Amino acid sequence: MEKDNMNKTIAQIFEARYVIPLYQRNFAWREEQIAQLLQDVYQAYKTNPNGNYFIGSLVVKKQHEEEFEVIDGQQRLTVLSLIMKLLGMNAANKLFYDSRPYVAEFLEAFYAERDFSALNHPTVASLKKAVDIIKGTNLAEERDTDEAVYFYDRDGKPDADFAQYFAQHVILVRVEVPEDTDVSAYFEIMNNRGEQLQEHEILKALFIGEIKDEKDQYDLGKQQAFSVIWDACSQMDYHIEKVLKKEQSVLYLGENFDEFRFEELPTMSEKQTATALTINKILNPTNPAETADDEAGGGQQNNNEDAKYAAIIDFPNFLMHIFKAFYEKEYGKPVPLDAKYMLEVFEQLNQKKMVKPEIFIGQLFRMRVFFDRYIVKTMVAKNEDNEDEDENFAWSLIRPDNKEGDMVFVNTFGDGLAQQRVVKALTMLQVSFRSRKYKNWLQTALRWFADQPKASLCIDAEAYWKMLDKFALDRFDAICQQQYSQIGEAEVLTRENSMSDGVGTPHFLFNFIDYLYWAEHATGGQHGVFDNEAHEGFRLKDFDFKYWNSVEHHLSRQKAENLEHSENYIDNLGNLCLISRGANSRLNDRDVKEKVMTYATSNMGSNRQIIYSLTEDNNYEWKEENIKAHYNALLELLGKRCEILGCSKSSSKGGAEENTGKSD
């Protein structure tokens, strides 16, 4: 086994050839893993561009000189191979999947820079999607910043300094097993190894260790009560009332589940026996499947028992929101919304005796209840089979209610405009800032929830959506500070006098535009946005925000090659819309007529609907004058953003006098 020089830069890694044996599964990394890798490396690059960043290990067995069989780490290695090629750092393929001809065909085409969109075999679907994910990931999204940085600039070139950092400063530990190793046995051991204890599990144990009575003895009853509530809160994909036993929900939330009655951890009754919690009991939460149907007496919106719900944030990062919302002053500096700082934040607060288990669990419990009722979850049918994962879900905003003694779930704000307005505002922010870390809009919402009357779990719908609108307006000012005047009829449209950032355009801007058009339409078009010539006769269809993370040029670069001065307007905001990566891959360089006729009836945001409608009205042509007209219309829309949303830049209050709905 090689013992020296195991630390390899990525450039050094790909000096060798790697074979992925047949016993290894196909490439399966999805967006979460790929985006996390890119964002972690980018954060390290921005923090210390001259330092090294370690990204894990690669276990291999040498076959020949500079050729290795990959035993562990092939998913990461495959992504690194794709990234290095896209950065222009790897000229030749060094990755070979054994006995998988379609993968070989894809890699050959990818490295030769040939079109591989027609390769549709299941073994290459994840590889094709990975390429789109790499190109479309906001590298700066994991940082606490309004910065938007994408893999390629508007000229389609990667950042040279970042490319050099990736090749020379990202380190992979390459471990060679002895030549006589039984590879199949080793592989089985590697895949059956236990998982490390997670930091939030350690935090739970530390909190429980602090729960003592007035005699400084462990209070077993309160420890058990703490554990039950913590475990329920940790099941983020389930409404908390579906995890707690029904009597617990009624005890803490009232008969109608609209009061917050939790004051302190209950002690055990005389009829109950309090026993010390084992480590296994502390670290293993309640299984919601055991309580959801038999004990909670649940039921879901529209009786959709085939639906699977998913929270927009995981439990460790939700805990960081609780620390930030309630303990930032005591901490003495901004609490980072990143779970990797969890124990560091807790230890500093605990040293100062600033965080008490009974108070913290009450804050966590209350915020989880608000989170479940007033922050959207995604809902996916169990048997849904859709190759475009960006589209394959619906949004859910529901709350529990008492119906003749049974707990049922209903729309949080009823079935009218109030529910639609809140869901649109929430989903616009979520699809724009989808990272589980540094989710600042969620922190703003949680602090707003914390300021509500403590005993009530009902909030005013209008006040809520205006708070969300205020966040969006402020974020628009922070991200889109460039100011441009409209382009006159005789003026030439150029990069210098217009918003022309191409694929580097912040995704939030597209979603905000879609939201403004929807809000104007929902309130009767009273601000004249649809009265101009560019929108004459247009009727907006309702739509659901999805994770559209790919910027599409309606008039493609290829189709514009023969048009005069097309380089001046091809990247203009008026020629761009946001679509799913799958759709972008399928559209490729089709002409505008084919795009419109293929996707005109699909779920599309307002901006894309308008572009397609204008194209159809213009005999399926889309030229510089059309881009200019649409661009000017977008500027008019953005200029009226405060009036459309009914609130000023400096205050979240204002707008319509009549309340349109409450959660109760």
Image (cartoon, rainbow, N blue to C red):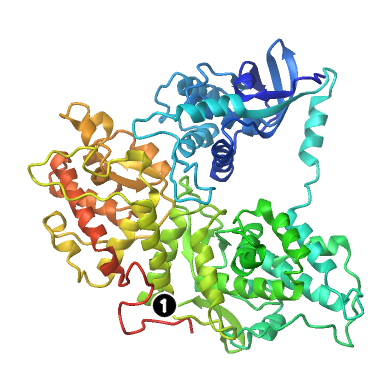
Name the residue beneath numbered marker 1.
463
Where does the image place residue 303, in percent across and percent down from the top left? Answer: 53, 72
The answer to whether residue 597 of the structure is visible from this angle is no
> Does 65 sit above or below residue 591?
above
Front residue of 612/372: it is 372
Q: Residue at x 91, y 75 (%)?
A: 216
> Does 481 sit above or below residue 117?
below
Q: How many numbered dots are placed on residues in this image?
A: 1
Where does the image place residue 241, in percent across and percent down from the top left? Answer: 64, 75
Tell me which corner region of the image, top left, top right, bottom left or bottom right, holds residue 582.
top left
> Does 48 sit above or below residue 483?
above
Q: Residue at x 62, y 67 (%)?
A: 329
Where does the image place residue 611, in percent across and percent down from the top left? Answer: 23, 49
Tell me which corner region of the image, top left, top right, bottom left or bottom right, holds residue 646.
bottom left
Instruction: State left or right for residue 23 relative to residue 653.
Output: right
Q: Residue at x 21, y 69 (%)?
A: 525
Residue lying farthest top? 65
> Does 458 sit above or below residue 524?
below
Task: Name the element at disc 1.
Answer: helix
Residue lying farthest left? 490
Q: Residue at x 38, y 47 (%)?
A: 506
For label 1, the crowd category at 10 Å Cα-Cα, with few meaning under 14, some 14 to 19 and many 20 or more, is some
Quadrant of the rendering where the N terminus is positioned: top right
Instruction: State left or right for residue 391 relative to residue 239.
Output: left
The answer to whether residue 45 of the structure is visible from this angle is yes
Where does the image place residue 264, in percent across and percent down from the top left? Answer: 74, 82
Instruction: State left or right for residue 68 relative to residue 299.
Output: right
Instruction: State left or right for residue 66 relative to residue 101.
Output: right
The amino acid type of the residue labelled 1 equals Ala
